[in-house]
Image: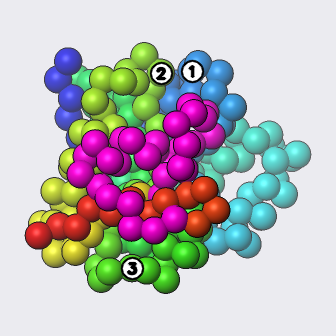
Amino acid sequence: MNITIKPLTKERIGDYLDFFDNRAFSDGNPNAPCYCTSANQSEEEIQKMVSEFKINGVKETVRKYAVDMLKKGKIYGYLAYGGDVSIGWCNACDIESYTGFVPEFARKAVCGKTVSIVCFEIAPEYRKKGIASALIKRVCDDAKENGCLAVEGYAKISEDFDLFDYHGPYRLFEKNGFVEELQCDGQAVMRKRLG
């Protein structure tokens, strides 16, 4: 399968929504409905969104917020494509762009200009085919090109599969050249220095 990784742009909003509408959680994953909005929202914005769940429904509300954020360029990351179809997603950007999802202990140990990877989602039928690794490679390549010193992720320290582990498994980062920099409360900062 030919996999292409592309940064999220306004021209790709339709592909992003198509992925989250139709493929991201088609296996009944309990993370649905998610449109990867929370990583880029303040606590106040999240609470406002949640307060609307009873009015419009969870999926409709989260999707509405996602559309608004996408149009304003407030969701960052990369889409993976199999042909012309979006089959995977990675939320990644400069660490300073995130109000949440980056553990506080990680923020205190930043080593310079850093890109954070805070979330992955791969369509069920495309998992275990190297798509998450392809996403990581593109994030690292772009970060290096943009003068960043490191890319990091925030993996749970566990060998058990966990549907709620949207940060990406420890071993995924490890096999892509990341090393554990520090850990706290069962979560590790996995960092790849660029140079």
Residue 76 drawn at (x, y percent): 40, 58
Magenta run includes residue 168: yes
- Nearer to the camera, 138 or 183: 183
Callouts 1 and 3 close, C-beta under 8 Å: no
Label 1 environment density (alpha carbons within 10 Å; few <14, some 14–19, many ≥20): some
- Nearer to the camera, 47 or 67: 47
Residue found 56% across the figure and 31% down from its top: 161
The numbered disc on residue 124 is: 2
Camera-side mark, 2 or 3: 3
Q: Earlier in the sequence, mark 1 or mark 3?
A: 1
Q: Which residue is mark 3?
A: 110
Label 3 environment density (alpha carbons within 10 Å; few <14, some 14–19, many ≥20): some
The numbered disc on residue 36 is: none
Q: For the residue labelled by badge 3, is the local secondary structure a helix, a strand or a loop?
A: loop
**Separation of disc 1 and disc 3 at Cα?**
36 Å
* Image: magenta residue range: 154-183
Magenta run includes residue 177: yes
Residue found 43% across the figure and 80% down from its top: 109
Residue 70 drawn at (x, y percent): 47, 55
Q: Give amino acid for label 2.
A: Pro
In-image side of 151 versus 189 (left or right): left
Q: Residue furthest right?
A: 54
Residue found 43% across the figure and 31% down from its top: 122
Callouts 1 and 2 close, C-beta under 8 Å: yes
Q: Give amino acid for label 3.
A: Val
Residue 132 drawn at (x, y percent): 34, 38
In the rendered view, tell whether residue 119 sits above or below residue 102: above
The numbered disc on residue 26 is: 1
Q: For the residue labelled by badge 2, is the local secondary structure a helix, a strand or a loop?
A: helix
Q: For the residue labelled by badge 1, is the local secondary structure a helix, a strand or a loop?
A: loop
